[in-house]
Amino acid sequence: MNLDLTSRTGGGTATVTGGPAKAPPSSAPPAPAPPTDAPAPDTAAAAGLVPAIQRRLGRGKSIPFGRLLGPLLIVLAWWAASAAGRLDPRKLSSPASVVTSAQELWVSGRLQESVQASLSRALLGLLIGVAAGLVLALASGLSRVGDAVVDGTLQVKRSIPNLALLPLLILWLGIGETMKVVVIALGVTVGIYINTHAALVSIDARYVELAEAQRLSRWQFLRKVVLPAALPGFFTGLRLAVTAAWLGLIVVEQINATSGIGYMMFQAQQYAQSGIILVGLVLYGAFGFASDALVRLVEGRVLSWRRTITA
């Protein structure tokens, strides 16, 4: 904008032409510029700030083979008490005696036969129970009719321990392998069903509305919404189911069994062989620990997209 001002001073004419008009100077200080070295919010993770917060507020760094620390401390305390003469060897053998008993069982072949029989029962019952629990959870969690028919029945079964069902199962199925596998499968089914069903019914309704808005088919809805949402609950149930399989195995191998780790322990009880009994207990514990670690490993691989406090 040009200013053309004309004034008369003493008979003369003065013309002043100016440039653009300038705003009057402000007395407020200028706003400070943001520091150039501060990372943007969306680049905080890339700059390493998020891992630092997790290390400060989380559980800390993972300890390699940390879950073995507790059992190892128990074995060391057991060994120290035995070496100091604090334990009666007739009631609780020393770790050295347990190792000697395991070697003798291995040389005779009894250990391999017992382990094979127990693993076959536990694995078969686990597979049947997982399949049954998963099918029942899907039927109950995705259908009102299925929920009305299945959920109440499974809740009643959860309240009845398998030990209470043993007399009826023996009456129906006898004392053979079928009864043993059914007892294991029943315990596994309940664990899988409860956790998977809870994950299914807790799916956010907004996801269902979004799937309907995207016009997903039933199969696409199951694959893209239901399956990812139910997997965490399923793996939790699978960990409990593995434990239930070993607990059921211990029970059924005490009932007129002719093979297995429990039968080996029962025979040792008749002759007061505490070393062999402890070998069986160590095997049960080792198999349970290993199977749980395997499920956790698979869970970590399958749910690698999930960020948790243990990550």
Image: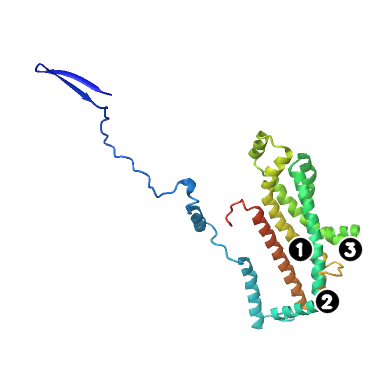
Provide the residue designation for mark 2: 270
Residue 223, image x, y percentages: 70, 44
Q: What type is the residue that disc 1 sits on?
A: Trp
The correct choice, above or below, for 116 with respect to 162 in the image is below
What separation in Å lies between label 2 and label 3 (alpha carbons)? 22 Å
Q: Is residue 47 left or right of residue 67?
A: left
Q: Residues within 10 Å of mark 2 (few under 14, many from 20)?
A: few
Which mark, by number, is residue 246?
1
Residue at screen point 72% across, 47% down: 197
Looking at the rendering, in which quadrant would you find the N terminus? top left
Tag 1–tag 3 contact (CB < 8 Å): no
| Residue 176 badge | 3
Q: Residues within 10 Å of mark 1 (few under 14, many from 20)?
A: many
Callout 2, which amino acid?
Gln
Query: Toward which corner of the image does residue 280 lie, by quadrant?
Result: bottom right
SS type, badge 3: loop
Percent position (x, y) of residue 168? 87, 57
Q: Could you tell whether 268 is left or right of 301 in the image? A: right
Outermost residue toward the top? 11
Give me the residue at 44% from left, 49% from top: 39
Q: Nearer the viewer, mark 2 or mark 3?
A: 3
Question: Residue 19 in the image: x percent, y percent?
Answer: 25, 27
Q: Is residue 256 left or right of residue 57?
A: right
Query: Where residue 209 sits in the image (x, y, percent)?
Result: 65, 36
Mark 1: secondary structure: helix
Observer-nearest of 263 and 104: 104
